[in-house]
Each structure stands twice: as structure tokens, then as C-alpha cells.
């Protein structure tokens, strides 16, 4: 069985970093990915995909990425369920990132001429805490 996803798109907002009770950092952001076809009205649709990064990768994306940056994300699709405070059951689909490649350069600053960067997740120990 295989569960691999590769996406290229732009961040819709700055990554948000938080820490789970065990102390591990987790970052979340949303990626806008254009669909490969146009509608009958000549418009190209866009999907907004939630991304989650853990540990060192979470810290790296929070430090280096911001709204509008172009990135490639490699990871796996995760579907999880939860119950709201009023008892309704919900499902969430998100990509758990294993690697993020920064495809553009920052607009300003001392590293504006630096090449594109790549960040990878640390090997999972199988005991990740769910941040929700």
C-alpha cells in the first residue's frame, strides 16, 4: 500500500507554530494549489489543502515561510475524526509533511540571493501526539 502526496502551491497564510503537551512542535498552514484544468467559464479552480508539519520541520517552515511563498510539499494524506463540543462528529483531511522544498526566494533581506532550500522531517518514532 502507498500513501504519498506531492503538492506545489502557495501559502495562504503564515505558518502557525504550537506545541503539543509532550513538548513537540507542530506547525500548520494552508496551501493553495491550482487545478490542472479550466471550467467552462474559462476559470481555473483552486484547492486549499491543510498541511501539518512536526518537530524540526515545523520549526523550519515557521522560520522560513510566509504567506504567498511557493513551496513543494511531500507527505502523506491523513483523515482524522473528532467530536465538537456540541457533540457533532467531524472529519478532517490534511497532509502530514515529510519534506518541504522552498521554490522561490524571499522578496527582501540578506538571503535574497540564496538558492531554493529544502527541509525534511526527522524520522518518526511512531509516537506523535495529535495536536487537537
Image (cartoon, rainbow, N blue to C red):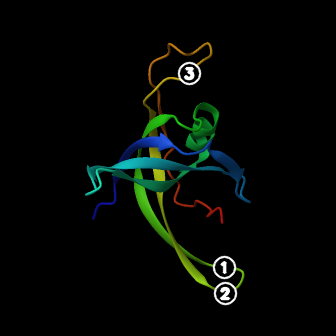
Crowdedness near tag 1: few (<14), some (14–19) or many (≥20) residues, C-alpha within 10 Å: few
Name the quadrant containing residue 88: bottom right
What separation in Å lies between label 3 and label 1 (alpha carbons)? 40 Å
Which residue in the protein does label 2 denote? Answer: 87
Which is nearer the N-term, disc 2 or disc 3? 2
Q: Residue at x 53, y 55 (%)?
A: 125
| Dots 3, 1 in contact, CB < 8 A | no
Name the quadrant containing residue 101: top left
Q: Position of residue 20 (x, y in %)?
A: 70, 57
If the image is split into quadrants, where does the C terminus sit?
Answer: bottom right
Which residue in the protein does label 1 denote? Answer: 84
| Extreme residue in the front direction | 41
| Dots 2, 1 in contact, CB < 8 A | yes
Q: Nearer the viewer, residue 70 or 1?
A: 70
Is disc 3 placed on a helix, strand or loop? loop
Q: Of the residues tagged 2 and 3, which is closer to the observer?
A: 3
Q: Position of residue 50 (x, y in %)?
A: 51, 56
In the picture, the disc for residue 107 is: 3
Q: Nearer the viewer, residue 5 or 120?
A: 5
In the rendered view, would you say 106 is above or below 39?
Answer: above
| Dots 2, 3 in contact, CB < 8 A | no
Q: Nearer the viewer, residue 29 or 21?
A: 29
Q: Residue at x 41, y 60 (%)?
A: 77
| Position of residue 70 in the picture relative to residue 12 (left or right) | left
What separation in Å lies between label 2 and label 3 (alpha carbons)? 45 Å
Amino acid at each position: 500500500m502507498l500513501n504519498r502526496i506531492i503538492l506545489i502551491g502557495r501559502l495562504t497564510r503564515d505558518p502557525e507554530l504550537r506545541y503539543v503537551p509532550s513538548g513537540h512542535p507542530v506547525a500548520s498552514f494552508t496551501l493553495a494549489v491550482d487545478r490542472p484544468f479550466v471550467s467552462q467559464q474559462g476559470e481555473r479552480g483552486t484547492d486549499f489543502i491543510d498541511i501539518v508539519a512536526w518537530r524540526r520541520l515545523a520549526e523550519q517552515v515557521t522560520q522560513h515561510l510566509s504567506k504567498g511563498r511557493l513551496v513543494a510539499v511531500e507527505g502523506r494524506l491523513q483523515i482524522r475524526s473528532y467530536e465538537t463540543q456540541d457533540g457533532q462528529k467531524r472529519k478532517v483531511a490534511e497532509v502530514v509533511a515529510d519534506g518541504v522544498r522552498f521554490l522561490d526566494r524571499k522578496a527582501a533581506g540578506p538571503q535574497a540571493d540564496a538558492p531554493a532550500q529544502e527541509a525534511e522531517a526527522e524520522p518518526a518514532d511512531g509516537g506523535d501526539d495529535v495536536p487537537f
